[in-house]
Image (tube, rainbow, N blue to C red):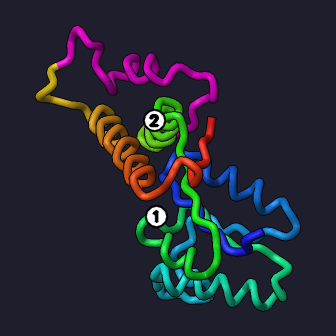
């Protein structure tokens, strides 16, 4: 088993859940979305090389008894050579784009509303009822609401981030969620 890993992923792919699952194993330490140097108050960011050097030092301190890795911290081209040089494994995680988009939109829409949305709630109907988006018969594509602009930005994010990961990896490197 390789005892250094990086899982490249974008927001809304379930990385928090995967990190919690990996951390439930007694021999795995998975850092989630950590780019700042711990124990520092100045929010200094790691570069990828320094980050994976640190993971190797942590691994060595446990006499190779634990596997150290990260998810949703560094992306494809930036991290892969450093993980491979450390003798580790580099993977990328993608999620069904429609499910991912729904998850991201629900998260961001909750922030706009200022309150939580029930898991089974129809977000589209809620947004129309609140006047945050317009029904297709009333839509003028030159004028978008704040919520519509957020949705369009998220569509772009979903397409470009997964494309970047898939462009850097192979089918064998891919972890498909859902």
Q: Nearer the viewer, mark 2 or mark 1?
A: 1
- Any mark on residue 75, and which? 1
Q: Nearer the viewer, residue 54 or 43?
A: 54
Q: Residue sitting at 56 percent across and 89 percent down? A: 40
Q: Residue sitting at 83 percent across and 59 percent down? A: 24
Q: Nearer the viewer, residue 19 or 92?
A: 92
Q: Residue sitting at 78 percent across and 68 percent down? A: 1
Crowd tier of the residue under label 2, counting other residues whose Cα lies within 10 Å: few below 14, some 14–19, many 20 or above: many
Question: Considering only vertical position in the picture, is 175 above or below 74?
Answer: above
Q: Residue sitting at 79 percent across and 68 percent down? A: 28
Crowd tier of the residue under label 1, counting other residues whose Cα lies within 10 Å: few below 14, some 14–19, many 20 or above: many
- According to the picture, the residue beneath numbered tag 2 turns out to be 101
Q: CA distance from mark 2 to mark 1?
A: 19 Å
Q: Position of residue 54 (x, y in %)?
A: 62, 87
State whether residue 130 appears in this view: yes
Q: Nearer the viewer, residue 177 or 123?
A: 177
Q: Position of residue 95 (x, y in %)?
A: 54, 40
């Amino acid at each position: 088993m390789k005892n250094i890993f990086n899982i490249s992923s974008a927001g809304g792919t379930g990385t928090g859940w995967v990190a919690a699952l990996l951390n439930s194993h007694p021999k795995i330490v998975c850092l989630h979305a950590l780019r700042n140097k711990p124990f520092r108050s100045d929010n200094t960011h790691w570069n990828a090389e320094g980050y994976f050097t640190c993971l190797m030092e942590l691994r060595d301190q446990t006499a190779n008894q634990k596997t150290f890795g990260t998810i949703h911290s560094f992306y494809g081209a930036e991290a892969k050579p450093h993980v491979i040089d450390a003798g580790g494994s580099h993977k990328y995680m993608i999620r069904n784009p429609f499910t991912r988009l729904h998850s991201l939109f629900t998260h961001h829409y909750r922030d706009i509303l200022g309150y939580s949305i029930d898991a089974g709630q129809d977000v589209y109907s809620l947004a129309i009822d609140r006047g945050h988006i317009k029904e297709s018969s009333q839509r003028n594509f030159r004028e978008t609401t704040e919520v519509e602009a957020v949705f369009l930005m998220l569509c772009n994010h979903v397409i470009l981030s997964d494309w970047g990961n898939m462009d850097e990896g192979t089918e064998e490197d891919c972890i498909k969620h859902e």
